[in-house]
C-alpha cells in the first residue's frame, strides 16, 4: 500500500538532520567538540529559515553564548525562526527579533525583557504565539512545538558529550529529550570540557555538539530577597496569611512564588509560626527553589522535603549540607528539575501563594499589561484547581467543603479544591492600584491579536485574597455577586475598594467570608521587622553556619 | 545555631542508605552486578519494614522477577511496606499483601487484579491510600511519596549500570530520578548485561544494582484490539463521534483511551473520515501508545506526530519505520516516556475520549466499583479541563464559547475548554447499565474508608457523551438540570434513560444540546464492518508492509 519511494518521502526528518550535520562535519574537532570560534558557522550549518528553535533560557541559567552567537548568523539565510523557550530574560533573546532572525515567540516568562516584548509586539516585530505556563510549554514540545534545533547549557561535558547540569539542571532534560528523539539537533555550551564528570545528568548519546564557551553561563539569583528590604506592611500580610490561611486550613504542602511577601512568611515561621504552635502542622512539604529566606525554617526543623525547579546562586553548599531535605545526587549536589517540580506543583501541592500586578473585579488576575509582557512562569500551573487530582488531604478537602456552589456542578458528589492565594498590597508597584475594573490584558490581546486576554489566574481558581485590609475567603462565596463583594471589601482605597458598602462588608464578615486583622486576632502594631527570624542577608549566612554564599550584590558588610 | 551533632542527626537518609548498601556489599559481583540467585538476599539487605517501595509495574512492562523475589523475603523482617506504583496488574503485586509483606497501596491502575484489590480492601489486608492518575502519582514521588527503594526493569544494562529501556522506557526515568536523588536505592532487573548499549536511557550513576533476570520481563500488549471483534454498534458510535464531535469542533489533537470504540474511530479515518473530507483537519497530533489500529491512518498520511506513553508489543519495527511520526532515538528505536506523554496529554491536547463502567445522573463517572478497583490510569489527567492551560486552539475555544454558564464563573472574561468525551453503549460489560442513579464508587469509599468516592471523570469536566442514541453536548447546558436532562436523553433503556421526557428531549434537540444519529445525518444502516479500513489483525500486518508483528495470541491465520 506504500512502496519504498513513498516510504522514503515520508521519512524526511532524519535525512534532513543528517544533511545538516554533514554540512557541519568539518567544524568538529575530537568527538562532539566544536571550538567556540566555529559557533556561528555551526549554527549556520544546522539551522534553516523557519525552524522551530529553543534557546535554553529559563528563569535562572542561560545559554547566553549560544544566544549571542545566533544573533551573528547570516540573516539572509536564517530568518523567520519560531522561538519556543521557557523565558526570554536576556537582551540577546529579543535582539533576535530586532535583527530579523526570529519572527514568532512561544514562551512562559519575560522577566527583564517584558517591556521589549510588548514593544516589539505592537511594532509588529514579534508575533506572539501564547504566554504559557512552563509545564504547558513542555507538553507542547512533545506535540506541536517540538524544537528542530535546541541550544542548551551545562556546567561540564566529557569527551563523549555526556553532560553535568548539576545544581542547575532545570529545563535541560526536557528540552533535550523532546528535540533529540524527534531527530532534532542539540548543541550544548558548557563551562568546561573534562575527562570525568561528577555525575552524568544527560547521556552523551542525546547531544550532537559541545562547545566550551568563552566564559561561564549566566545565572540570575532570581529568588534571593534581602530580609532588610521587607516592609512592615508585608509582615502584616504575612501574619494574616499564617493565621488566616496556613493555620486555618492546616496547609502542609505549598509553593511560594517570587516576592517579599512569601519571604516574610518564610522568615516568620521560626517566630510567629512557633508562637502559633504550627511547627509540624504547616509547611512540611514544599516545591520551591532554594530560597535563602528558607534557611531559618530549615535550621529549626520545620521542613521535611523541598524539591526544586532550579538552583539559586550562592545556595550550593548550604543545600548540599541538607540531603534529608533536598534532592541531592550521588555527587553531593542538588538535582533540580523544572518539569518534575511543576508536576508536583500541579498535582501534589495543597496551596499556591503568589502576587500579581492586577486583579479585576471578578477575581481574574494578570501580570501581562499592554506595555509589559512579564509572562506567567509556573503560576497558572500551580495557581489553578488541578481537576485531575484524586488523592485527598485535610486542607484540600476543607477548601472544597467550603464551596457552597459545588452541588450546582457535581450534584451530590463531593470534591476538594486547591487553595490559590494572592497576597497583594492594594496599591502595588509604582503605587498603581492592583484592583481594577478591567485588566490591561484586554489591551494586550488586542495589540498582539490574541484570541483571549492573557490571564495568569482565573477568578474561579482563586480561593483567597489577602491585603492589608484582611482576608477574602472567595471559596466561601455562593455566587459571583458575593465574590465581587468580597473582593471589594479587601480592595482598600482603590476605585474598586471604594465601591464596597459597609453593610455588605459587615454581612460578609458575619459569614466568615471576609476577615479583618481584628477578626483574625492579628495586631497590626506587632507587624514589624522585629518579627523576622533573619533581618539581613548576613543573618541568613549566620543561620546557614556560613554555608550560604550570597552573590556580591547582596553583600553589604 | 546548630552544631555538628544536630546537623549529623538531621542527615540520616544518606547514612542509612550507605549502611544498607554496606550490608549488601558481599552480594555484588563485578561493578553493579548482582547474580539473580542473590536477589532475595539483596532485597533483605536494602529494604526495611515500613519502607515506601516502588515496583515498576505500569500497564505494560513489568519488573516481574523483582516483584516475585520480594514475595520471598523474610516477612518477620520486612513487612508493612507502603507500595507506591503506577499499576498492580501482576498476581505477585497483590501477593505481597496476602503474604503480609506490604500493607498500604497508592497506585493508578489495577488491570487484571482489580477484583483482588477490592477483596483485600474489604478484608482489611490492603490499606488504600488513593487511586491516582499517573502524573499525579509521579508528582507525589517528588513531594510526599518518594520511594526509599525502587525495583525497576530495562532491556539491557552495561557493566557500569547504564540502562537501555528503549521502546519501553515508560515510567523508568521518573521513578529512578525521584528515588536516587533522595538518597534512595534503585535495583534494576534487565534481560541482558552487555558491553555496549544501543543507546543510554538512564545513566549508570543513578542505579545501585543490576540483576540479569532468569527470563525477559513481562510485557502486556494492552492496546492491541483485533478489528475482527469490533461490533456494528461500536462502528455506529465511532461515526457519531467523527461527525458529531471531531468534525463539529475540528479536533486536531487528542488521546484515545483503551477500547474498541477508539479503535473503530482509528479504522474509520481512511474510509468514513476521508468521505467527510476530514484529512488534515482532525487527528493530526496525538498522544497515544502505538496502537496497531492506527497503522492504516498513518499509512494514509493522516497523522503528523504521535508521542507515546509506552510501547506496544509487536509494533517495534513498524514504529521504527516511521521516524517522522514517532519519537525515535539515535539507535532507531522508539523513546516512550509516560511522564512527558501525560504532560502533553494534560496541557497540549484538545480532546480526551474514552469509556467508563458507570456514569451517574449528574455526569460523574467511575471505573471503581465495590468489587473491582480497576483504577483510572491517565483518564483523570487528560479527561479534565486543564485549568492551567493558556494557549488557544480552535476546538478548545469553540468548546469554551459554547458554555452558557461561564459568565457566572469569570464575569466577562472568556476562556476555552477541553473536550472530554465518553463514548459508551448504554448497557456495557455484562449487560450492566452504564447510566446509574448513584455510582458504586460510594460503596467503595465506605469499604476502603476513603474521604471521597473515587471518581474517574467529574461531571463538570465531561463535555460530551456519545451513545447509540446520539450525542449529548453537555458543554451547551446552562445548568445542572439541563445537563441531567441531556444525560437522560442519551441513556437509552437504562433506568435513568427511561426517565427522559419526550417533550424535554425535543427541546434539547432543538437547542442542539442533543443530536440523534438522524439529526447528525448518520445512517445507522451504514454502520457495518465494511466501513473499517482493516477488518482483521492480518489486514493490519498487510497495511504495515509486514512490519507489524502481532503477538501470537492475536494471530489466527
Image (cartoon, coloured by chain):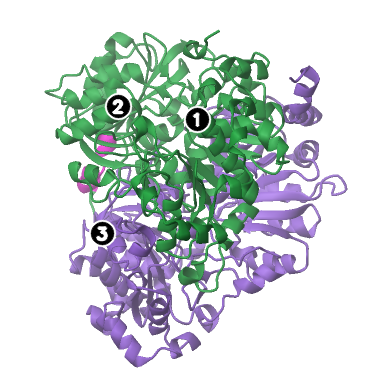
Chain colours: A green, B purple
Label 3 crowd bin: few (<14), some (14–19), many (20+), radius 10 Å: many
Residue tagged by mark 3? B282
Alpha-carbon distance for marks 1 and 2? 21 Å
**Residue B152 placement (x, y as % from top left):** 62, 42
Report whether mark 2 lies on the same chain as mark 3.
no
For discs 1 and 2, the disc positioned in front in the rendered view: 1
Whether residue B188 is situated above or below residue A487 in the rendered picture: above
Alpha-carbon distance for marks 2 and 3? 37 Å
Q: Which span of residues is magenta-colored?
A: A4-15
Residue tagged by mark 2? A113
Q: Which mark is residue A260?
A: 1
Q: Which mark is residue A86?
A: none
> The residue marked by circle 2 belongs to what chain?
A
Report whether mark 3 lies on the same chain as mark 1.
no
**Residue B224 placement (x, y as % from top left):** 45, 61
> The residue marked by circle 1 belongs to what chain?
A
The quadrant the N terminus of chain A occupies is bottom left
Whether residue B184 is situated above or below residue A159 in the rendered picture: below
Q: Secondary structure at mark 1?
A: helix
For discs 2 and 3, the disc positioned in front in the rendered view: 2
For discs 3 and 1, the disc positioned in front in the rendered view: 1
Q: Secondary structure at mark 3?
A: loop
Amino acid at each position: 500500500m506504500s512502496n519504498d519511494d513513498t516510504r522514503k518521502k515520508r521519512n524526511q526528518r532524519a535525512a534532513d538532520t543528517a544533511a545538516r550535520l554533514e554540512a557541519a562535519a568539518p567544524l568538529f574537532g575530537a568527538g562532539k567538540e566544536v571550538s567556540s570560534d566555529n559557533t556561528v558557522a555551526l549554527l549556520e550549518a544546522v539551522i534553516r529559515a523557519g525552524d522551530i528553535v529553543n534557546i535554553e533560557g529559563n528563569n535562572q541559567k542561560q545559554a547566553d553564548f549560544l544566544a549571542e552567537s545566533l544573533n551573528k548568523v547570516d540573516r539572509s539565510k536564517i530568518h523567520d525562526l519560531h522561538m519556543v523557550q521557557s523565558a526570554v530574560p536576556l537582551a540577546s533573546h529579543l535582539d533576535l527579533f530586532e535583527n530579523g532572525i526570529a519572527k514568532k515567540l512561544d514562551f512562559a516568562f519575560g522577566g527583564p525583557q517584558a517591556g521589549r516584548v510588548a514593544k516589539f509586539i505592537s511594532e509588529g516585530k514579534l508575533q506572539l504565539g501564547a504566554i504559557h505556563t512552563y509545564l504547558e510549554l513542555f507538553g507542547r514540545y512533545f506535540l506541536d512545538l517540538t524544537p528542530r534545533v535546541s541550544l542548551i547549557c551545562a556546567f561540564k561535558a566529557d569527551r563523549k558529550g555526556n553532560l553535568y547540569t548539576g545544581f542547575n539542571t532545570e529545563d535541560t532534560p526536557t528540552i533535550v529529550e523532546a528535540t533529540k528523539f524527534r531527530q532534532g539537533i542539540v548543541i550544548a555550551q558548557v563551562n568546561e570540557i573534562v575527562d570525568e564528570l561528577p555525575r552524568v545528568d544527560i547521556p552523551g548519546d542525546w547531544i550532537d555538539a559541545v562547545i566550551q564557551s568563552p566564559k561561564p553561563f549566566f545565572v540570575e539569583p532570581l529568588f534571593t530577597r534581602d530580609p532588610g528590604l521587607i516592609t512592615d506592611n508585608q509582615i502584616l500580610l504575612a501574619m494574616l496569611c499564617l493565621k488566616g490561611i496556613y493555620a486555618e486550613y492546616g496547609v502542609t504542602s505549598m509553593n511560594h512564588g517570587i516576592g517579599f511577601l512569601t519571604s516574610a512568611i518564610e522568615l516568620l515561621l521560626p517566630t510567629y509560626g512557633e508562637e502559633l504552635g504550627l511547627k509540624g502542622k504547616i509547611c512540611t512539604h514544599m516545591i520551591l527553589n532554594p530560597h535563602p529566606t528558607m534557611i531559618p525554617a530549615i535550621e529549626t526543623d520545620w521542613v521535611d522535603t523541598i524539591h526544586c525547579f532550579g538552583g539559586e546562586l550562592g545556595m550550593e553548599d548550604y543545600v548540599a549540607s541538607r540531603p534529608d531535605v533536598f534532592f541531592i545526587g550521588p555527587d553531593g549536589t542538588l538535582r533540580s528539575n523544572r518539569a518534575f517540580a511543576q508536576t508536583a506543583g500541579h498535582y501534589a501541592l495543597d496551596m499556591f501563594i503568589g502576587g500579581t500586578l492586577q486583579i479585576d473585579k471578578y477575581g481574574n488576575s494578570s501580570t501581562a499589561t499592554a506595555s509589559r509582557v512579564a509572562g506567567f512562569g509556573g503560576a497558572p500551573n500551580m495557581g489553578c484547581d488541578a481537576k485531575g487530582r484524586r488523592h485527598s488531604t485535610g486542607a484540600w478537602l476543607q477548601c472544597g467543603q467550603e464551596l457552597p456552589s459545588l452541588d450546582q456542578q457535581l450534584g451530590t458528589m463531593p470534591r476538594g479544591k486547591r487553595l490559590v492565594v494572592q497576597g497583594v498590597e492594594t496599591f502595588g508597584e509604582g503605587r498603581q492600584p492592583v484592583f481594577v475594573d478591567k485588566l490591561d490584558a484586554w489591551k494586550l490581546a488586542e495589540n498582539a491579536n490574541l484570541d483571549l486576554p492573557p490571564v495568569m489566574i482565573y477568578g474561579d481558581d482563586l480561593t483567597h485574597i489577602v491585603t492589608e485590609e484582611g482576608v477574602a475567603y472567595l471559596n466561601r462565596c455562593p455566587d459571583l455577586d458575593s465574590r465581587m463583594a468580597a473582593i471589594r471589601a479587601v480592595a482598600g482605597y482603590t476605585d474598586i475598594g471604594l465601591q464596597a458598602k459597609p453593610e455588605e462588608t459587615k454581612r460578609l464578615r458575619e459569614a466568615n467570608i471576609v476577615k479583618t486583622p481584628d477578626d483574625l486576632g492579628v495586631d497590626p502594631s506587632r507587624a514589624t521587622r522585629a518579627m523576622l527570624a533573619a533581618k539581613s542577608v548576613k543573618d541568613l549566612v549566620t543561620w546557614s553556619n556560613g554555608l550560604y554564599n550570597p552573590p556580591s550584590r547582596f553583600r553589604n558588610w
